[in-house]
Image (spheres, grey):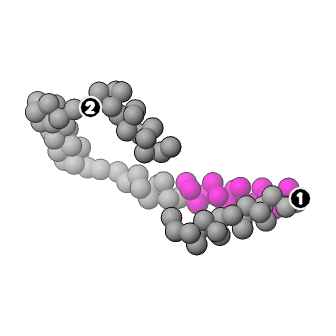
Amino acid sequence: MGADIQSRKMLFMQEYLRLNDEQIIDKLSDLLHKEKSKRLKVKLKPITREELDAKLNRSEKNIENGEIYSQNEVENFFKNRFQ
């Protein structure tokens, strides 16, 4: 995210915090949830049985080759990435 988007978010938050109209707050909250839901649906497209089988085969091959991560390694990766 660039500095411009950060500035826009800060300005939006300042305006949002000044709101006293519950209807506007409800509408903004609804809009946010709807937009987030739409974008999630776009990312979660169904896969075919063949695609699933190919993913399973790759995963099994990775396991056979020792290309695996422990639970702790995965948790640490995400903790470090999102902190």
> Picture coordinates of residue 48 (x, y %)?
26, 49
Give the residue at x 77% y 63%: 14
Left or right: 15 with respect to 63? right
Query: Can residue 60 be spotted in the picture?
Result: no
- Counting residues from the start of the chain, the first of labels 1 and 2 encountered is 1
**Mark 1 and mark 2: Cα distance apart in space:** 49 Å
Proximity of marks 1 and 2: CB atoms separated by less than 8 Å: no
Above or below residue 44? Residue 77 is above
Residue 19: within the magenta? no
Q: Nearer the viewer, residue 82 or 55?
A: 82
The answer to which image quadrant residue 80 occupies is top left
Q: Which residue is mark 2?
A: 69
Task: Answer above or below: position of 24 versus 62.
Answer: below
Q: Is residue 2 left or right of residue 51?
A: right
Three-letter amino acid code of the residue under disc 2: Tyr
Q: Residue at x 52, y 68 (%)?
A: 2
Q: Nearer the viewer, residue 74 or 34?
A: 74
Instruction: Say which element carries label 2.
Output: loop
- The kind of secondary structure the magenta stretch mainly shows is helix
Badge 1 element: loop
Please tell me the numbered disc located at residue 6. Answer: none
**Magenta residues, as a range?**
20-37
| Relative image position of residue 16 (x, y in whole percent) | 78, 61
Report whether residue 15 is seen.
Answer: yes
Relative placement, left or right, of 51 versus 8 is left
Q: Which residue is mark 1?
A: 20
Residue depicted at x 29% and y 50%: 47
Q: 12 or 2, which is in the foreground?
A: 2
The image quarter in which residue 65 lies = top left
